[in-house]
């Protein structure tokens, strides 16, 4: 990893670069689409599911550093895409992307990245980059790819420094769907694909899309719900006009306080009407804000598929999938809110329940994709309470 005082001349064979806002220049080999993109650099510790990670809208405005060295080696396919909206702008990996080797693969990862408009950078010491993020926090940066190795490094440094960062940024309205949709897909089975959703006689869940992964809706269907998905800016009266038995608040990118400017009043109105509410990730954070708590920007965030979470109710530990750079400040939780889960990595809040209301939320991703399935029960808990 080069330091800020190093030469801007690319080493032999370099066709990609990551330029941090402090002037650090990290050379590598580019793949995917050519060009440049700006974002916050984070790291993800999952060993599988890179395609799901790269299409998770919660990564909008971010450049993902994968700590697992072999990324792209099983190619890509149509079934493992979590969303078709903006998500991660690029990724940084250790080893060069090898030829696809998996019976489900339909296209090489490099070609898939090009089709998705995402930039990749290989040949980077991702352990050193991860340690840097752990020590100094997630930096703003520009990732760039040019097959000829022609880069205007001073301009890229300026671009990274001028980008305002994720704090105070509302990205939910950028990645949210624009129209209401009746969700049709069920859970996936090897050899059969995704099941069709049954609708008759099922409790109706209105899911607010702040940047949702599709597997969330599939798990709601699997748990027995009929699901209608609505845009992030859908108002309280519009939601109630759909006659929901419960309302789901999805994950999403950006600062929960910024998105909360229009979302929190809607959530407060739902709580006042005692509508059953279940929120995850960004939805969980805004549920907490609606209940009187506040959120904070984390030093490095939690991103991976191996995060242990303790459930206070019985001491059970769930291994969870996480992707968040903001968290509910558990010191600000009012007496009307019960903390239900905490991270065993750092003690940060990972779950709440609103006392006297049918409302709860978790910071992690119970739908996985990728990740363990320890927390699927939460969908059953929510949908089962609506009958």
Image: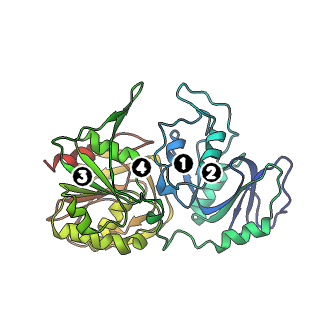
Q: Are marks 4 and 2 in contact (CB under 8 Å)?
A: no
Q: Nearer the viewer, residue 305 or 131?
A: 305
Which residue matches tag 2? Answer: 118
**In which quadrant will I find the N terminus?**
bottom right
Q: Disc 4 vs disc 3: Cβ atoms closer than 8 Å?
A: no
**Mark 1 or mark 3: whose residue is earlier in sequence:** 1
Residue in the picture at 43% in, 59% down: 176
Q: Residue at x 18, y 40 (%)?
A: 200
Q: CA distance from mark 1 to mark 2?
A: 9 Å
Q: Which residue is mark 3?
A: 205
User: Residue 379 at x, y = what percent?
Assistant: 26, 46
Q: CA distance from mark 4 to mark 2?
A: 18 Å
Residue 195 picture quarter: top left
Is residue 86 something one can see in this rendering?
yes
C-beta proximity under 8 Å, tags 1 and 3:
no
Q: Circle 3 — which element?
A: strand
The residue tagged with tag 2: helix, strand or loop? loop
Q: Which mark is residue 138?
A: none
Tell which circle, 4 or 1, labels the residue nearer the N-terminal end. 1
Q: Is residue 61 left or right of residue 92?
A: left
Image height of 265 relative to 343, above or below? below
Mark 3 surroundings within 10 Å by alpha-carbon count, few (fewer than 14), some (14 through 19), many (20 or more) = many
Nearer-the-camera pick, 262 or 19: 262
Q: Which residue is mark 1?
A: 54
Which residue lies under the disc numbered 4? 213
**Can the viewer see residue 349?**
no
Provide the secondary structure element on which disc 4 rests: loop
């Amino acid at each position: 990893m080069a330091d800020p005082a190093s030469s801007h001349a690319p080493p032999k064979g370099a066709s990609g670069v990551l330029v941090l806002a402090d002037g650090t220049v990290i050379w590598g080999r580019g793949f995917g689409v050519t060009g440049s993109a700006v974002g916050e650099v984070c790291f993800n510790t999952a060993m599988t599911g890179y395609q799901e990670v790269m299409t998770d809208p919660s990564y909008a405005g971010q450049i993902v550093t994968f700590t697992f060295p072999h990324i792209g080696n099983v190619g890509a396919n149509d079934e493992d895409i979590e969303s078709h909206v903006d998500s991660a702008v690029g990724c940084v990996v250790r080893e060069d992307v090898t030829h696809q080797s998996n019976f489900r693969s339909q296209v090489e990862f490099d070609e898939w990245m090009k089709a998705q408009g995402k930039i990749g950078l290989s040949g980077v010491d991702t352990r050193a980059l991860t340690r840097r993020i752990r020590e100094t926090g997630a930096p703003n940066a520009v990732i760039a790819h040019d097959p000829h190795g022609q880069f205007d490094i001073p301009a890229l440094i300026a671009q990274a420094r001028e980008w305002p960062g994720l704090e105070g940024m509302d990205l939910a309205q950028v990645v949210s769907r624009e129209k209401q949709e009746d969700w049709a897909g069920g859970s996936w089975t090897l050899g059969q694909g995704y099941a069709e959703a049954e609708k008759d006689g099922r409790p109706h869940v209105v899911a607010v899309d702040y940047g949702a992964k599709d597997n969330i809706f599939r798990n709601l269907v699997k748990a027995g719900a009929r699901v209608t998905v609505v845009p992030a800016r859908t108002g309280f009266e519009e939601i109630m006009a759909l006659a929901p038995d419960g309302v789901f608040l999805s994950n999403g990118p950006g600062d929960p306080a910024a998105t909360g400017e229009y979302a929190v009043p809607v959530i407060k109105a739902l709580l006042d009407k005692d509508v059953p509410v279940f929120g995850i990730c960004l939805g969980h954070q805004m549920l907490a804000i609606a209940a009187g708590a506040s959120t904070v920007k984390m030093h490095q965030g939690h991103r991976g598929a191996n995060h242990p979470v303790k459930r206070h109710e019985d001491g059970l530990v769930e291994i969870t999938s996480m992707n968040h750079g903001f968290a509910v400040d558990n010191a600000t939780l009012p007496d009307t809110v019960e903390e239900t889960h905490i991270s065993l990595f750092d003690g940060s809040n990972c779950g709440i329940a609103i006392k006297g209301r049918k409302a709860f939320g978790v910071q992690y991703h119970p739908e996985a994709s990728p990740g363990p399935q320890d927390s699927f029960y939460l969908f059953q808990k929510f949908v089962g309470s609506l009958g």
